[in-house]
Amino acid sequence: MKIKITLLILFTSIIGFSQEIALLKYNGGGDWYANPTSLPNLIKFANQNINTTIKGKPATVEPGSPDVFSYPFIHATGHGNILFSDSEILNLRNYMLSGGFMHFDDNYGLDEYLRREIKRIFPNSPLVEVPATHPIFQKPFAFPAGLPKIHEHDGKRPQAFGIFQNNRLVLLYTYECDLGDGWEDAEVHNDPKEIRDKALKMGANILNYIFNN
């Protein structure tokens, strides 16, 4: 009963907050700070195109901090190891169960470490591929084939994996795609405008899903 009451309080706090998003500063040695221009660019695009009112500069939050409950959306990226302590695992699990949303974007090299940590967060809920028919790919921009391909990496098809709790997508893991690179300033990777537009539109869909579901 105590746990249920606590989660209810946390959920109430999340849904009452304004539109703000955060970047996850994790331990383990991976470069959590990669793609410094990506979230500001995504925020600007979303505010201009899908009527969000997100603060222009994302916050930085640590996985064990109570501050995670201040943000309906937390983004994490990087190339290397990611490691959570037991208390951070519990905090992130409670965050997602109480209404929060985590987006992990593999910037190449994160996959094996992230899958290990996700299994620790939700040991009884395996990652499943999110189908192209899911609302996150439908509006406000249509992606009938699902997740777009932004960077080649190993040349595999892009995949969106998720954790669902009570039929709600609470964790999105984008693999072989690299949305964050596509959100960066144009001169960082010299991606064509068409590719950057796809990345930004997919990011806007993620934010739209969070703020409207």
Image (cartoon, rainbow, N blue to C red):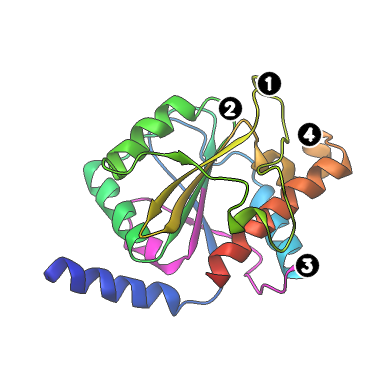
Q: Residue 114's x, y, as percent?
A: 42, 33
**Where is mark 1, residue-wise?**
155
- As helix, strand or loop, the secondary structure at mark 1 comes to loop
Q: Which of marks 1 and 4 is in front?
A: 1
Residue 20 visible in the displayed image: no
Q: What amino acid type is highlighted by mark number 4?
A: His
**Where is mark 4, residue-wise?**
189
From this view, report whether residue 34 is shown above or below residue 50: above
| Cα–Cα span, label 3 and label 4 | 23 Å
Residue at x-position 72% and y-position 63%: 140
Residue at x-position 72% and y-position 74%: 51
**Where is mark 2, residue-wise?**
108
Which image quadrant for residue 65?
bottom left
Q: Residue 154's x, y, as percent?
A: 64, 19
Badge 4, how many Cα within 10 Å: few under 14, some, many 20+? few
| Cα–Cα span, label 2 and label 1 | 12 Å
Please report the bounds of the magenta region as a residue range.
50-75
**Left or right: where 67 falls relative to 158:** left
User: Can you say which quadrant of the picture contains the N terminus?
Assistant: bottom left
From this view, report whether residue 188 is shown above or below residue 5: above
Q: What amino acid type is highlighted by mark number 2?
A: Tyr
| Cα–Cα span, label 4 and label 2 | 14 Å
**Where is mark 3, residue-wise?**
49
